[in-house]
Image: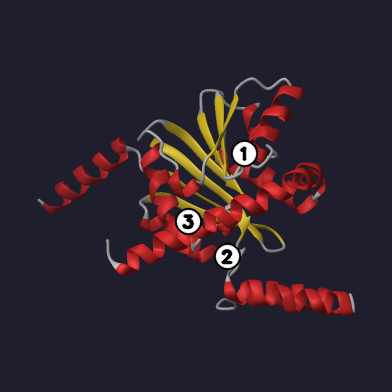
Amino acid sequence: MTAEEHAGTDAAAANIARQQRFWTRRAASWDHGAENNPGLVKVIERVLVEAEPTNSMRCIDLGCGSGQLTLRLAARVASVRGIDVSQTMIDLLAKNARERGVANVTGEAVPMERLEIEAGSIDLVVSNYALHHLRDPDKELLVRQANTWLRPGGRLVIGDMMFGRGGEARDRAIIGSKVLLLIRKGPGGWWRIAKNAGRFLLRFQERPVSISSWEAMLTKAGFVDVQAVPVVNEAAVVRGSKQDATAGDVTAATDASAST
């Protein structure tokens, strides 16, 4: 392993440990507050629309938390496997599933960066407001892995905050609106600007990237029919499908016919 690879491995391990501590501390407040966030609820609803779930699907929810998306998805599919970095979150997911009488949900506390799934065994991979916590190389790796987990025709759907650091007009509009809102709050808002600017520029806790970056990652990983839908404020949903082997054979045959 090269020095650069060692550094990347160390950085990934440090981020995993930081996320485990952070979400273990915040698990209870997230469980009680997430469903009262109208913007988050709208993103969850859009993820479900783009997922087009059916009752035969085997699904994975990456960064499932205490089940805000998982449990709603479970009502429409055969099974959902929730993945989260925090065991406390997984315990809350299990508790919420029991209380709602949901029997087709399982949970596993494992970092997404270390998740291993049998190739071609999954119909749908979803994630909501989780992947912006990953380092950018780990986002790309996870998208590539999701393509291997999915059966041909399977779908990846990601809902998240999606904006960069000002490289695109949409990014600048989002950042400007957030700053203006905090300025109007007075000294407390000014302090949050300073704190959040440091976190945003250093990419210490949150590492959002733009819609176009997500579209490029999915396309590079081999997904087809890649589409993105802005939802609310900084949030958007992007989805793509794993190419159906039959469609690929038809395309290849067509190309071969055209060249003869």
Task: Say what amino acid the circle numbered 1 marks.
Answer: Gln
How is the protein colored in the picture? secondary structure
- Which residue position is annotated with label 3? 13
Residue 164, relative to residue 137: is it above or below?
Answer: below
Which mark is in front, 3 or 2?
A: 3
Task: Give the residue drawn at x 55%, y 78%.
Answer: 167
Q: Earlier in the sequence, mark 3 or mark 1?
A: 3
Label 1 sits on residue = 87
- Which of the 4 image quadrants contains residue 18? bottom right
Mark 3–mark 1 distance (CA, rounded to whole Å): 17 Å
Mark 2 lies on residue = 207
Q: Position of residue 165 (x, y in %)?
A: 59, 75
Quadrant of the image containing the N terminus = bottom left
Q: Secondary structure at mark 2?
A: loop
The residue drawn where x is 81% and y is 42% is 32
> Which amino acid type corresponds to the residue marked 2 in the rendered image?
Arg
Depicted 200 relative to depicted 237: above or below: below
Real-space Cα separation, disc 2 to disc 1, in angstroms: 23 Å
Q: Position of residue 144 (x, y in %)?
A: 38, 50
Instruction: Give the residue at the far left of this rendering.
Output: 260
Of labels 2 and 1, the one closer to you: 1
Q: Give left or right: position of 243 versus 185.
A: left
- Using the image as rendered, state which of residue 13 and residue 104 is in the foreground: 13
